[in-house]
Amino acid sequence: MVPTTRIDRVNILLVDDQPSKLLTYETILGELGENLIKVSSASEALQCLLDNEIAVVLVDVCMPDLDGYELAAMIRQHPRFQKTSIIFVSAVLMTDLDRLRGYECGAVDYVPVPVVPAILRAKVSIFAELFRKTRALERLNGELEERVAERTSALEATTQALQEAGHRKDEFLAMLAHELRNPLAPIRTAVQLLRLKELSEPHRNRARDVIERQVEHLVNLIDDLLDVSRITRGMITLQLEPVLIGAIVARAVETARPAIDAHRHVLEIDLPDELISVEGDKTRLVQVIANILHNAAKFMDPGGRIQLSVRREGPNVAIKISDVGIGIAPDLIPRIFELFTQVHSKSERAQGGLGIGLALVRRLTEMHGGSVSVHSDGPGRGAAFTVRLPVMASPLAVLSSQRKEPGVIPEVEPQRILVADDNHDAAEALSLQLQLAGHDVRTAHDGAEAVAIARTFDPDIVLLDLGMPKMDGYEAARELRLRSNEGRRLTLIALTGWGQQQDRDRTADAGFDEHLVKPVAEAQLFKALAAAAGKRKTEAQAG
């Protein structure tokens, strides 16, 4: 309850046709500190009631024109004065019938004359305080109703947002199933073709190429999903270094070129003469530009045109990618960078998408201190995406840091390798790949079996899956470290679908030398094997 103060003074209306009585009432009630209003007739009283908010009316019963009963009845008929307290004062009409009539007309009390000052003050004070508390309660109720209305509106907005998110999630799951089935269909067909004995070698090579391309597509799909999860939870770390914008554009174009050429699009590139560098994660920035280029290639009729330009804008560099494709509806532009937003989810176009590419673009750009915006004049009128990044002061230091990573598969001297994975197909395929490369390979399908085989096989390198029955990869790694022969360097490599930093930290604590995330590219696998073999050879020569 709001505490009352003298600032909350209420109006008390004194009605009597005799000025002396009005003066008496004013003297008696003056101690209350309220605002006293004096009138000498019923008509004046009615006008005063209409002009002011009155808490208590003290009225003489016997007055000319309209008496107190008639005035009270008229006051009560007005909706605004239903709760105004009316106190009658009378020296003549004092019988029980008079009092009953007064109460029927709307009075709340009946004071006889001569008036006892203390009693009159007490009665008026009670009704004035009641009026004050009632008004305070009404204000509180009004504020409460406003708050309830605001909370209700916020709840309705939240509910609607949740419903929209749920709807987008359902659409995403349906699209995810579609996107996963797309590469699985040609993989299954290619596998069935490879089973045919009469299949010629060129056709076998084509089938293998199909499988490789579709597996790469699946890997990229899963990587995008994992990137969204990591960025959302703040689990991704940028490897910042000075990089040239020209190098980023070149790598992104190289990545998106197959999609652009497949649709027979024309790509126009406009780069400035000056060298512009930024501090960023080259891989992630290439991902940003390549994602936009891929979208431009997908959502445009064959034979379209894509324009990529780079311009210096004060302290920033602006990379603008525009197309003449299907465009974006105005109502979708504000949420085009939200997760799972499908610009053309009901389109008949074969190109799909999970609605996560542009969300990644925005979040990765913001992590670099930049921004991304989009403009489209509407459906069928193309779209233009602009990525802005803060420019470094000098590009000279960047030139020496740009190195081309070798893409060749390193040769590795024959090694004794133990492969442990509870997925029999995965273990068998990896073992065959290693055997064909000239290595001596043994296979286990749980951690306990891997430890047992290692006792007699004495491997140089152990490739361990982490989630295995009987004994997981972590415990198996510890056992292998304890049981390894003295004088021999045993290399433990984790093969797992878990690739976050805490996962890498855990494998390192368990004694692993390397952490590879499935599916492992051939070059990455053999690079790890070569590093292990080289390290062991160096240690042997030093010993």
Image (cartoon, rainbow, N blue to C red):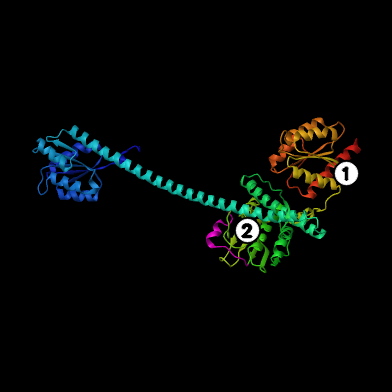
Give the residue displayed 80% in from the left and 32% down from the top.
Answer: 452
Task: Quickly name the residue at label 1.
Answer: 414
Q: Nearer the viewer, residue 301 or 294?
A: 301
Which mark is on residue 23?
Answer: none
**x and y, in percent, of residue 307 in the image:** 67, 66
Asked whether residue 412 is in view, the answer is: yes
Magenta stretch, overall SS: loop
**x and y, in percent, of residue 299 in the image:** 63, 63
Q: Amino acid at mark 2?
A: Gly
Q: Is residue 406 left or right of residue 186?
A: right
Q: Is residue 109 left or right of residue 230?
A: left
Asked whether residue 392 is in view, the answer is: no
Residue extending furthest bottom? Answer: 303
The residue range painted magenta reads 324-338
Give the residue displayed 74% in from the left and 53% down from the top.
Answer: 191
Say whether disc 2 or disc 1 marks the residue closer to the N-terminus.
2
Give the class, few, some or many, for how many residues have Cα within 10 Å of label 2's Cα (few <14, many ≥20). many
Where disc 2 sits, the SS reads: loop
Residue 392 occupies quadrant = bottom right
Q: Amino acid at mark 1?
A: Pro
Task: Quickly name the residue at label 2.
Answer: 352
Q: Nearer the viewer, residue 432 or 278?
A: 432
Q: Are marks 2 and 1 in contact (CB under 8 Å)?
A: no
Image: 137 above or below 78: above
Give the residue displayed 55% in from the left and 56% down from the top.
Answer: 335
